[in-house]
Amino acid sequence: MTTLLCVPIMARSVESAHADAVQAREHGADIVEYRIDELFSGPEDEGEVLRLVGDSPVACIVTCRPTWEGGHYDGDDDDRVSLFERLGTGERPPRYIDVELAAYARSANLRQKINLAVNHAEQRRDVSTGLILSTHDFSGRPADLTRRLIAMGDQAAASVSKVAFRARSLRDNLEIFDILAERERPTIALGMGEFGLMSRVLAPKFGAFLTFASLRDESATAPGQPTLDELLNRYRFRSIGRETRVYGIVGWPVGHSMSPLIHNAGFEKVGHDGVYLPLPIASSESGKGGYESFKATLLELLHHPGLGLSGCSVTMPHKEHLVKLATEEGWELDSVSRLAGAANTLTVASGMPAVCNTDAVAAIGCLREAMGDLAGGRVTVLGAGGVARGIAFALAAEGVSVTICNRSADRAETLAGEIALSFPGLATSSPWAGRQDTSPDAFINCTSVGMSGGPAPDETPLDRAVFERRKAVLMETVYSPVRTKLLSDARDAGWRTIDGVEMFVGQGARQFRLWTGRPAPAALFNRLVRDALGG
Ligand code: NAP
């Protein structure tokens, strides 16, 4: 069964709702859901609703959601049931009507009237409209979810069961997938909110009856609901099937990551049956902690029988958590990740997870392209955070003498000391105030200074004068904006520069190769990221 793509339309007038329905069809929707709870307030509005449905340019579901189930209708139940009767038995009926399980189960009278208007095994009248029985919880997973599912299953007149609740974490999606896998009739099951996106995109993988997508960006009012464009073009909804492999970016927050953009486009380009999703795993506001939820969530995703999680990018604040988990679980771990204590890539082949650090390898690749053989060279690394650790260890492993300069001197000293243990004589630290006095073959900025949205977006970690004294190489890891002040100053002074997009594309391309076994379309990645960032 093909999963339908449905666009919900809050009908405020017949004309505007029809205009939206035409747009939805033109953009690839199969069906629309007219939410009539703002259009219909009583029998005097029946004519408008009949016109809305009768003249609809697209097959439709009609829903009049009451306030007690999160909608706007606060009129009489008898009135909306009479409307449904007229719609179902009329000349141009809707494809489906949606009625809340709670209302349907509560009143035998309502049940009887609805049953007269919809198509089911006992129906004697010539009607075609199907009944969607639905249940929603906007606050979280309902404690009585199982009871509700059984109650819906018991109602023989229903054609489709629908369950929607606010996902509290990625793990709620797995229960949603299990509901779909065990369905006895066509079923809609989805998680609302940021954590529920996965259930909406992967609906075809688990045989859902339909999924919803908005016509416009309604992220402010319907968080987690993708737009039609995102679903069809970014996530390639029509190509998702049971065998489609799942990948994603694990982090917190992950909403603005460029990784879904490049990897999904890459899968399309090489014909890989995969989809790449944001996989938010929350941590505390300070970014500290969060290991237990990272571990529990990732292990559940990996062990879910139907999901087929085949790889992840891992970003802040979970890069250290990935190494800790790999060590605890005995997964394969590459030497840079082990030494640096941070990794950004998980690959699952034949059920065996392996972890590596493509950030560091990509940075080394970029430097080698600019400088040739790195052994015996001198590099000053600015910063001692996650990215600095990986790069500094990888440089030392290449035989480069590394000087670490960090605002917090203790972190620089600790990192240099750790590197020197594995690579004696190849790492020192220098005070942050003296960073401009080092004379390396290359500077690498691994601080977040200059990053938009970061702690010092308008600053630069090196004075312009540094670039005027001599010529060497400057590598920037910040990629938003593409052209930081640091990069511009170095370029203007005639330095060889490497921008953060080169490293970003490099680390993504290495992940892509690990996951698909094919070379990444790096030129495509590069163009997509630069177009998106305006650089
Ligand atoms: P992190 O672990 O939070 O480390 C941040 C570093 O920046 C620390 O060394 C910190 O110093 C320093 N810092 C912050 N504010 C500063 C300021 N006002 N003055 C001086 N130093 C300051 O972050 P991360 O994960 O290593 O990421 C660092 C950068 O790498 C980010 O800008 C990110 O965009 C970039 N990145 C790029 C790629 C890529 O592919 N191009 C991939 C990942 C990350 P303290 O220790 O004193 O706090």
Image (cartoon, rainbow, N blue to C red):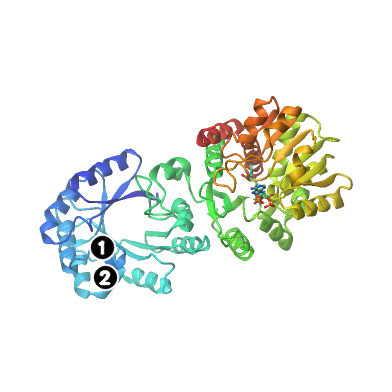
Residue appearing at x 33%, y 45% in the figure? 30
Q: Nearer the viewer, residue 201 or 271?
A: 201
**What SS does tag 1 mark?**
loop
Q: Is residue 221 left or right of residue 414?
A: left
Residue located beneath label 1 in the image: 120
Q: Residue, x 66% and y 27% (percent of image)?
A: 491
What is the crowding at mark 2: few (fewer than 14 residues within 10 Å), some, or many (at least 20)? some
Foreground residue, 10 or 247?
10
According to the picture, the residue beneath numbered tag 2 turns out to be 103
Q: Is residue 68 above or below residue 375?
A: below
- Report whether 334 appears left or right of 189: right
Q: Is residue 309 above or below residue 183?
A: above
Q: Quadrant of residue 378?
A: top right
Kind of residue at badge 2: Ala
Which residue sits at x=24%, y=41%?
19
Q: Secondary structure at mark 2?
A: helix
Horizontal side, residue 35 vs residue 260: left or right = left
Determine which quarter of the picture holds residue 64: bottom left
Which residue occupies the foreground of this view, 290 or 235?
Answer: 290
Alpha carbon distance from label 2 to label 1: 19 Å
